[in-house]
Amino acid sequence: MSKDKTLIAKKEIYGTLRSCNFFIRRIGLSFVDKKPNTFLQKINVLSSFITASSFVALMLISEYVYIVYLLAKSVTLEKLMGSYLHIAGYDTMSFGKLLTIWYKKNTFRRVVNDLADIWPVDEKNPEAVAIKNKCLSTLRSRQSLYIFWNVLGVWLYNLTPVALHLYRLARGIPSDLGFVWQMYYPFDKTNPIVHEFVYIFETASGLYSVCCMLSSDVFFITMASHISMMLRILQVKIRSLGVVESADGKLIGGLHNCYDEIIDLINVHQRLIRYGNDLEDAFSVVNLINVLLSSVNICCVMFSIIFLEPLMEMGNKFFIAAALTQMGVVCWYADDIYRASVGVSDAVFASGWYNCNPRCRRALLLMLQRFLQRPTHILRFYIHRIVDINYLH
């Protein structure tokens, strides 16, 4: 690919990662921005990462200590479920994803840059152009939906104590500003001076936790969408092999030599397999934690919504919407990669292989065998392929 086309490809790819990059920057990382060169830039990035990881880690520890404290007191099930048990599960996933994107940051940056080499910039096939436009449009809408539920949910949690406090004061009822989360502190958090700092800490911790969650999940669904899109465009190109039209649109008979095209398509498929493997290696453990903890979180928050909280309290209701959206989007794109990969082998059958010379036919046969042996998919901790049926379960 020429330099100009590579720049256009990177611009389009970076555009799909704009919202993801916004949240990643909040925790001191980026897969799109230039690496920090000066000492001050490195200090700024490092301090942002240390601040974010410290807030999330302290929040997670405080939540787990509070849960252990309740268990030690043998509290009732209602009291335990009302302790925001599902929030501890959410923060566990967030911290795990923070560690993942930090540990794999160089791999993710390489994948984003290498993707530009095979990005469909100037597709002339109308079907391929339609696939690209539809995939990018669908990706933007799903990114927005997922971000909306998470951001709105955390701000509802953060502002609910303030709204209740102002409501009581307006009614002339004595009131104190409450707390965002239920956490354990080794000091008296109700002290008037300490209370404000605790509230600020809990608000910031919740925001950092959401940034970690969105950074990982939005990046995963974006890259999975791109891999799926290019596999579908690859299908279109394979189906056109051996099909040669004249200037007036009529098919030209005879045996055609499309060997170089076949080799180029095989190279593209190999690159896509490698990208899929990189996603699999990076997110296999995270996706396992996603499936396990999301199931527990959904059960806990549903119990709280149905049996414990008032009808008008909205924080947990938006939490369950975010949890269901998360599982749905992750499973959808993981399954979409698998289906698009399987469709590549079907495209070989649908191609004009019968119009190709013997050398091209042998190459197509080898291509078919390779596609059938190794379809691209995302594994959950190398145990089971993530498909839509997991979401239904």
Image (spheres, grey):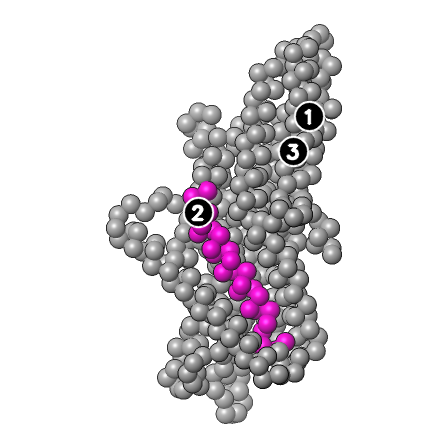
The vertical placement of 127 against 384, above or below, is above
Q: Are marks 2 and 3 in contact (CB under 8 Å)?
A: no
Q: Viewed as shown, does residue 363 lie left or right of 275?
A: right
Q: Say which of marks 1 and 2 sits in front.
A: 1
Q: Residue 91: image x %, image y %?
A: 53, 65
> What is the CA distance from the residue labelled 1 to the residue labelled 2?
34 Å
Q: How many marks?
A: 3
Taking the magenta stretch, the answer to whether it contains residue 73 is no
Looking at the rendered structure, the secondary structure element under dot 2 is helix
Q: Say which of marks 2 and 3 sits in front.
A: 3
Q: Viewed as shown, does residue 187 lie left or right of 319?
A: left
**Residue 250 visible (yes or no):** no
Identify the residue shown where x is 52% and y is 77%: 66
Identify the residue shown where x is 39% and y is 55%: 28
Q: Which residue is mark 3?
A: 374
Q: Which residue is mark 2?
A: 105
Identify the residue shown where x is 31% and y is 56%: 44
Mark 1 closeness class: few <14, some 14–19, many ≥20 residues within 10 Å: few
Farthest residue toward the left?
39
- Which residue occupies the foreground of this view, 34 or 103? 103
Name the image quarter holding residue 222: top right
Q: Residue 182: image x %, image y %?
A: 53, 77
The vertical placement of 242 against 106, above or below, is above
Task: Name the amino acid type tagged 2.
Answer: Lys
Task: Name the amino acid type tagged 3.
Answer: Arg
Identify the residue shown where x is 65% and y is 14%: 360
Mark positioned earlier in the residue sequence (3 or 1): 1
Q: Which residue is mark 1?
A: 369
Magenta span main SS? helix
Farthest residue toward the top?
254
Q: Quadrant of the C terminus?
A: bottom right
